[in-house]
Image (cartoon, rainbow, N blue to C red):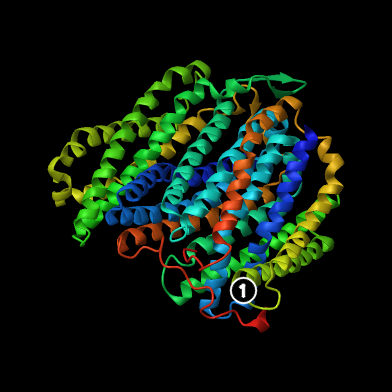
Amino acid sequence: MDIFWFLTFAVLLAGYFALEGFDIGLGVLLPVLGRSPADRDRLVGAMAPFVLANEVWLVALAGVLFGAFPVLEGQALSRLYPLVVALLLAWIVRDAGLWFRRRADGAAWRLAWDGALWAGSAGLALAWGAILVAVARGLPASPLDVPAVAGGVALLALLAWHGRTFAAWRLRSGPHGSGRALLLSACAAAAPAVLVMAAAAAHMLGNAAPDQTLTVLSVMVVPVAPILAGAQVWVWRTFSRGALPTFF
Amino acid sequence: MDVVGLARMQFAVTGSLHFLFVVLTLGLAPLVAIMHTRYAIGGNPLHERMTRFWGQIYVINYALGIVTGLVMEFQFGLSWSGLSHYAGDVFGAPLAMETLLAFFLESTFLGLWIFGWHRLPRGLHVACIWLVTLTAYASALFIMVANSFLQNPAGSAEEGGRLVLRDFGALFTNPTLVFALPHVLSAGLWAGGFVVMGASAYHLYRRTPEREFFTRSLRIGVLTAFVGSLFTVGFGYAQFGPVSDVQPDKFHGAVPGVALGLMIMIGQFVQFGVMFVLAPLLIRDLLARWRWLHPLLMIMTPLPFVAAIAGWIVREVGRQPWLVYGKLSVADALTPGLTRADITASFAGFAGVLGLLALVDYVLIARAVRRGPGRVALGAADLPVTAEPVPAHSL
């Protein structure tokens, strides 16, 4: 039972980077790929219908951490305190950029929230890189140092590439615009998380919740899993091609 | 203020901000779902305009519900790791279910609903907003199950210095849950009804061209507030018995006492007002025609929100000094080694950013109301993918 919930956790983390990774990467590249306001609108329109379905993988991940590995939840989040706070603030700023950028008129308004979208995305990538490095090193006492920054920058570059392949695929332009390139960059974006999970496996399995809790969770969640997967598939079938929605 | 006080204040501020937006989400979601259903069945363009206008208000409000909720979820591990250590094997389960069974689906279906105009078949599109409503209510259920466990740790037993789960069903039949859940959901309907009522009164008062639209909306708002306030007050009084059985001193402190008085005053007064004045004035649309009443309706709009926050203050402050009532004190649940610098920085960051965004969001909601149904972005025309291709050299 603990192996099942560990695998669920690992799949959610890998899925988060494969999916939300391209939203973050595209946000980072927004000033580069979208020189004009119209270009930026199209780039945001490409990712907009996926964001809500992608970012929620991390919410689910935190829920599984609390439900199935409660002791680790307290340990990990409090040891990583400054990084987790930075991650949350970046996430909030990125989301605010998305939700607010088209809610009022004026070039300055749009530019300010596009800036929030860019800064929040960059902050998310940097914070995640540092967090993955810290977890791989067994949660050091002070998680902010040179390897952490290097990890952040490396992940930023990786997700930016993933965002670029997504934009090329969705907007059907450029030499990288194939589905295969997107699949490849998705696997690459998830790879660091998979490696970190493999390194943390023994520690996590030793700190799972007792069987009674895990059984209750399984009985409640497993029957609904096909609906969760089906909803995700529905999003991809609906928004993979055609015109770009404009709400964000 | 010491570290515990700061951590408590951070939770109180982010939690209150979260609920200010969530309570409206809970109330508007079913209203928008009903409007959308009427449009799908009857095809009346007025119902489409109502769905998009009130749906846009709902969606703008939703943004702050998400970002404040993210902080709530992670705050347990950041500030209160003693809680996950002592009671995580029980308390974590409803929170995990909330994320997997409720919010995961709510967020996915909301994306499909917001961006699905012009591409989903009408029936499936309506199904999306109903699924959003259903999962939002499921979310409220699981969060209230978790909160009620803190009020009265039913279904668990202490073993080796930690709580273990003994009876999962007892979490759902907790006496601090069964009346509190409908109380909260009804308060959502009340808040949603008042926002629809207040915004409609604004347009009727200003004599904008959307007379029929807002006369009908006013009726929906007042009827929703009538049902919501009746059940909110009823289930509010119904809680006194079970609460005083498990927490006899709950209302004795100064803060919970004052908050309780404020909530009951607003609740009772406004509920009578809706039942005996506003609802009868719907006959022959007197309320829509009596323009002198409209400023009063606008001023009343924030009242259910004030009462809702007062209600949470009663429930949460009244349980002090316990985090898990009778088992784990708030001070003992604090993350070991959390420094004043840590908590001050994160408090300033969260409160500053979320407070600012909350203000911006309210301004945007007011702006969307003022612009009226004629200029709604939700469901607006799509952007062609190939109009002006991204230059190949930049890819």
Left or right of B298, for residue B158: right
User: Is disc 1 surrounded by few (<14), some (14 to 19) or many (20+) residues within 10 Å?
Assistant: some
Left or right of A30, for residue A215: right
Element carrying mark 1: loop
Q: Give residue A55's position: percent from left, percent from top.
A: 62, 54
Give the residue displayed 70% in from the left and 78% down from the top. A175
Q: Give residue A205's position: percent from left, percent from top.
A: 82, 37
Could you tell me which chain the residue with mark 1 belongs to?
Answer: A
Give the residue displayed 24% in from the left and 57% down from the top. B203
Q: Is residue B343 visible?
A: yes
Give the residue displayed 72% in from the left and 50% down from the top. A13
Q: Give residue B80's position: percent from left, percent from top.
A: 67, 38
Residue type at numbered disc 1: Arg
Q: Give residue A212's position: percent from left, percent from top.
A: 72, 24
**In the rendered view of the protein, which quadrant contains the C terminus of chain B?**
bottom right
Residue on which the image places disc 1: A172
Q: Against B168, is B29 above or below?
A: below
**In the rendered view of the protein, which quadrant contains the N terminus of chain B?**
top right
Left or right of A200, for residue A209: left
Q: Is residue B348 visible?
A: no
Give the residue displayed 68% in from the left and 51% down from the top. B341
